[in-house]
Amino acid sequence: MNSYKDILSKHKGLPGGIIQAYHAIQKEFNYLPEEAIIATAKEFGIPTKDAYEVATFYSYLSTKPRGKNIIRICESAPCHLAGTNEIVATLERELGIRMGDTTPDGKFTLEFTQCIGQCQGTPAITINRKPYVDVTPEKVPTILAEY
């Protein structure tokens, strides 16, 4: 496992370097540890509050530990009208957690997101960025079994 300090030094000075560094750190650790955000501020020569603002502005970045498999449920209007609430209830029941939480074994995290570009097959979810469309409560156990 790379140190986040090594990751930061690779991205310093690049256009969009902080965002790229945060993506690389999150890929390695599955979230942005507080120490990494503080180190980012130092490495990029910006105030710590600015490094936190970048880390918390984008919904795809997380500052809290997450599970190995990130399940993101689209809550845009088309998905919501097509039954997002039923999918959320089913996922919460199957995994034994609420939205925003991670399973005790660290295997799954449930998160809301805005449009994932799958409006042709609502409701839609992604697991680790892999899209699943036309999701029904009956399909959820089979989808989860893949992970």
Image (tube, grey):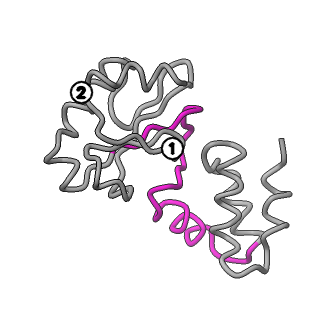
For the N terminus, the image quarter is top right
Three-letter code, disc 2: Ala
Residue where numbered disc 1 is placed: 130
Horizontal side of 132 relative to 61 (left or right) equals left
Camera-side residue: 142 or 58? 142
Looking at the rendered structure, the kind of residue marked 1 is Lys
Magenta span has 105? no
User: Which residue bears the numbered disc 2?
Assistant: 89
Q: Quadrant of residue 120?
A: bottom left
Q: Nearer the viewer, residue 98 or 43?
A: 98
Give the magenta range.
44-73
Closer-to-camera residue (76/62): 76
Taking 51 as reference, is 79 above or below it?
above
Horizontally, residue 87 falls left or right of residue 33, namely left
Q: Is residue 48 magenta?
A: yes
Q: Picture coordinates of residue 77 (x, y %)?
A: 18, 56
| Percent x, y of residue 88 | 27, 32
Residue located at (19% from left, 31% from top) = 86
106 sits left or right of 11 in the view: left
Residues at circles 1 and 2 in contact by the CB criterion of under 8 Å: no
